[in-house]
Amino acid sequence: MESVAAKPMSTKPKLLIVEDDPALGRSLQRGTRAYFDVVMKESVESAIDLIEGGQALAAAVVDIGLPDGTGFEVVELLRRMDRNLPVLILTGSNDPATINRAHALRVEFVCKPFFSENLAQFVQRTLSGSQYGDREKLAVVISEITDGYKLSQRESQILAFAAEGIPRSRLADVMGVSENTVKSQVRSLLDKVEKQALADAVWWVRNRAGL
């Protein structure tokens, strides 16, 4: 009998995508399959089964709104398994609770349906291995500046969010405060660190972190 050659196994890193919308799932696959061996799941339960089964993952993209629960259940399990795994969450809402929870879990987030550019940047950072190393460096520098310049908790939070790339126009939403509060806190922050604009402070922070 003629032998059949075994199909070669993929050498690409594995990316878990948890998304129940078929059209969006296909779009996510198209944007990542050149770089990853994509594993698609459509529910919290199926994603958790995969993770608990010991599947090695290089990164994950997780929708928050799933038919049997919230994607945060998946993200929290991923974090328990690997505190530095690159994770991007997709959400249909930019409410402060969702954004702050994503920040606490040290994951990136993007609001649907306009995610293509964010997805491309996430893939690039994941493949370069820079994503969480950069965040750790920023955290150290922010802590040093907070102590050295006597920043308040809110001023420190503003500087951290801005340094991680959250636009000035979205800080109020992310922090769950008024725009006037952000303006006041930014002015106080800039006075303390002796910078003219938030963009200057961000450049200063990232430069100190070697980014």
Image: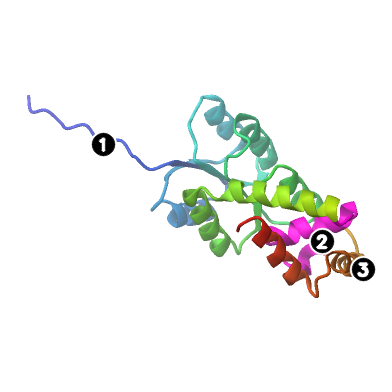
Mark seen at residue 141: none
Decide: marks 1, 3 in contact (CB < 8 A)? no
Mark seen at residue 184: 3
Q: List the residue tagged with mark 1.
A: 8
Residue type at mark 3?
Ser
Can you say which quadrant of the picture contains the N terminus? top left
Q: Is residue 60 visible?
A: yes
Rendered image quadrant of residue 208: bottom right
Of residues 210 and 76, the one drawn nearer to the viewer in this rendering: 210
- Label 2 and label 1: CA atoms lie apart by 48 Å
8 vs 88: above or below: above
Of residues 82 and 200, the one drawn nearer to the viewer in this rendering: 200
188 vs 39: above or below: below
Q: Position of residue 4 (x, y in %)?
A: 15, 31
Helix, strand, or loop for circle 3? helix
- Label 2 and label 3: CA atoms lie apart by 15 Å
Helix, strand, or loop for circle 2? helix
User: How packed is label 3: few (under 14 Cα within 10 Å), some, or many (20 or more)?
Assistant: few
Of residues 67 and 11, the one drawn nearer to the viewer in this rendering: 11
Residue type at mark 2?
Asp
Q: Position of residue 113 (x, y in %)?
A: 61, 62
Which of the two discs, 2 and 3, sits closer to the camera? Answer: 3
Q: Position of residue 114 (x, y in %)?
A: 60, 64
Image: magenta residue range:
149-175
Colouring mode (rainbow / by chain / secondary structure / one colour): rainbow
